[in-house]
Image (spheres, rainbow, N blue to C red):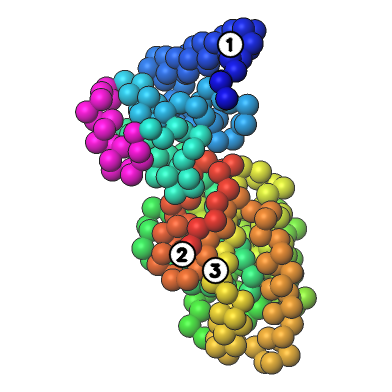
Amino acid sequence: MPRVAPPEVDRVAAAHAAVAARRARASVKLAIHDRSRSAVDVVEAAWADPLATAEASLRVRELLTSIPTLGPTRTAKAMGELGIADSKRVGGLGVRQRRKLVEWLVHREHRDTPQRARLVVLAGPTAVGKGTVSTYIREHYPDVHVSVSATTRLPRVGEVHGVNYYFVSDDDFDRLIETDQMLETATVHNAFRYGTPRAPIDEALSAGKSVLLEIDLQGARSVRKVLPDALLVFLLPPTWEELVRRLIGRNTEDSAEQQRRLETAKVELAAQDEFDHRVVNSTVSTAAREVVDLMLVPKYNRSFTHG
């Protein structure tokens, strides 16, 4: 069957659209070259706004060569390091490629300027290992300020006052609230109260340090209301069976309390879509690295990663 040529009006419209698209991409590249827009801003727009077609349709190679001082040779080397094919467009990158590209761009464009401090909230179901991951970050990533929460519960074996938690009385907890020294507070498992002292966080952010805040689901929701720019990360277990094993294995609650916490965990797991990112805690070191890496990722870029 012979091919049917499209109507002349369609060919003209397509040609006009193609010209407009090329001009739009050229405008984006010129803005990067003139430094009126950063490459990070362009990729953020491409991934956040479905209408940002000029940014999304830009080839990664074109994006990089638009950056002043980055010629074809350096661009080719960077593409190889990032594992991005020469034909790949910005809008077609996968989650891991997006993270690697943003990290590279941030380092490239802002290596001579202080990194913007960010508050990252780490939450998740009971026994998922939030405390273990945050402790690992405290010990291995000194540039991150790990917030210490206050609680009215008694310390568990090995926990240290001022390191793991500030262990306070109910009266002291009330005074912290009354004097507006708490960023957020919550009652967990219908038993003990937890809260985040505000002053150390404000001081760390003012000093340019990113802050990790490890709290429960209620607290994460409260922080989002007070500080909407905070990045919320949900820590997941590899499987439900592994979560049960961890809860029972730590042997810090009786069987009735364990069952109650598992029921609470089911409710908490159902809230994971409220968060900006999700990290699976298979191994503590990898999960910790994923959380720290997310401090460089644009907030809107929701992802599911395996730790």
Left or right of residue 257: residue 83: left
Q: Name the residue under label 1.
A: 11
Q: Does the magenta stretch include residue 141?
A: no
Which residue shows up at 58% across the image and 11% down it?
11
Left or right of residue 109: residue 23: right
Relative to the observer, which residue lies in front, 300 or 130? 300
Amino acid on which disc 1 is placed: Arg
Which residue shows up at 39% across the image and 26% down it?
63
SS category of the residue bearing label 2: loop
SS category of the residue bearing label 1: helix
Q: Mark 3 points at which residue?
A: 130
**Vertical side of 194 occupied by 85: above or below:** above
Decide which of tag 3 and tag 1 comes sooner along the chain.
1
Q: Does the magenta stretch include residue 70?
A: yes
Q: Mark 2 points at which residue?
A: 307
Decide which of tag 3 and tag 2 comes sooner along the chain.
3
Amino acid on which disc 2 is placed: Gly
Is most of the magenta stretch helix, strand or loop?
Answer: helix
Range of magenta residues: 69-86
**Vertical side of 134 occupied by 34: above or below:** above
Q: Distance between the residues labelled 2 and 1?
A: 50 Å
